[in-house]
Amino acid sequence: MTAQVNRRNFLRGALSTTAVLLAAQSRGLSFGPPPLGFDNDRHFAPVKVSRDRIIREVVGLRPYRDEGFVVGAQRAGNKLIVHNYGHGGAGITLSWGTAALAVDLARDFQGARTTSSAFSAGRERLHPHFAVLGAGVSGLSTARLLQRRFGNAGAVVTIYTKDLPPETTSNIAGGFWSPTSLFDREVASAKFIEQFRTAARISNRAFQLLAGTEYGVRWMDTFELNRNEDSMQRELPGGNDLYPNQKFHRDASHYFGFPFVREYSTMLIEPQTYLNALLRDFYIAGGKIVVKEFRSREEVMRLAERVVFNCTGLGARALFNDQKLEPVRGQLEILLPQPEIDYCYLSSGYMFPRHDGIILGGTFDHGDWSLQPNPEQANGILESHTEIMKALSRG
């Protein structure tokens, strides 16, 4: 009996102590140095950068607009065309945010009228019918939000697309959550910047709720490698508050040979796993797919659906005559997977450790439509990451 009472008292005391510690940590208080023997240094397993470990090279074209992405609606005859494209290098990152903004634009527009047998008196019931052009990450995210918001109203969502995963441009993306390389701050309007920040926050929250193996989303320690201290003062893309666990390091011998390093946490998305999961969810919710390539706006106007979402990415340049849209070519060298690599880093290039391989990248070629790997760029990518790993080994 005494042992049971003591155990009860011990548990009460432990819980009380834990509550005090958590409350203190939330206020930024500290209870002194870590206990003796606690290693406060981060261990970095080295990335094995070598040409003989390359398993594939891929090239993708980012749909870039210096003014920023387009989320807007226009009436055309009896249709509402809702645009959601031009995300540059942040297609996956902003997908849920811009999809939410786009779907909001169609909220008050009536869908197609069809007679329902449930209304025997001949009354009509509204059944929203939506068309989504494109099955990349923007198209799939938009389609899923339409199903969520209008599913109870009997919504029918059909995706019209030339390509399906794994053949979309989104499948080639690095999958690192950070809304970068999508607009020019000297050109973008204040209205766009506000829209951008809203989209980033919506999307960040949405991905947090998908973290886990099912959707291929996980939190990763990330290290931004800088040569000068001023670089550490700039705001992170979308807002500093979207990146928890921020720390600053000034120890080149331990942090990749760079004198100024900013550490933070963000999410890494595995495109193959993630896009397949979205496509599965779309089918389960009753979605339809039509494999079709549109060559003109007139073909789009012949669709039966009265609300059409344009998520064609770079294809919107020709289909909707957006001449401000241009390709930004990116080349990736993908090495054999290394399960022990549990961090990302960003420098002149970047390294993301995914289950399907170690992603090495860092090229941004504006106006280049070529999908062929460039041997000189491949050499440059490998050399830059080799130097970073040499510095790590010297530390």
Image (spheres, rainbow, N blue to C red):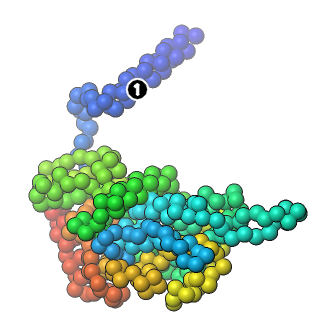
Q: Is residue 74 above or below residue 392?
A: below
Q: Position of residue 167 (x, y in %)?
A: 49, 80
What amino acid does circle 1 point to?
A: Thr
Residue at (49% x, 64% y) in the render? 102
Q: Is residue 304 left or right of residue 169?
A: right
SS class of the residue under badge 1?
helix
Q: Position of residue 336 (x, y in %)?
A: 37, 73
Q: Position of residue 38 (x, y in %)?
A: 26, 38
Q: Is residue 114 left or right of residue 274?
A: right
- The answer to whether one can see residue 58 in this image is no
User: Disc 1 marks which residue?
Assistant: 18
Q: Which image quadrant for residue 62?
A: bottom left
Pick the quarter of the image with the C terminus: bottom left
- The answer to whether one can see residue 114 in this image is yes
Q: Which image quadrant for residue 88?
A: bottom left
Crowding at dot 1, Cα within 10 Å, few <14 / some 14-19 / many 20+, comes out as: few
Residue at (54% x, 69% y) in the render? 140
Residue at (52% x, 85% y) in the render? 297
The residue furthest front is 77
Residue at (52% x, 17% y) in the render? 8
Q: Is residue 29 left or right of residue 175?
A: left
Q: Position of residue 228 (x, y in %)?
A: 11, 58
The residue furthest right is 120
Q: Is residue 58 above or below residue 96?
A: below
* Nearer to the camera, 283 or 115: 115
Pick the quarter of the image with the N terminus: top right
Q: How many marks?
A: 1
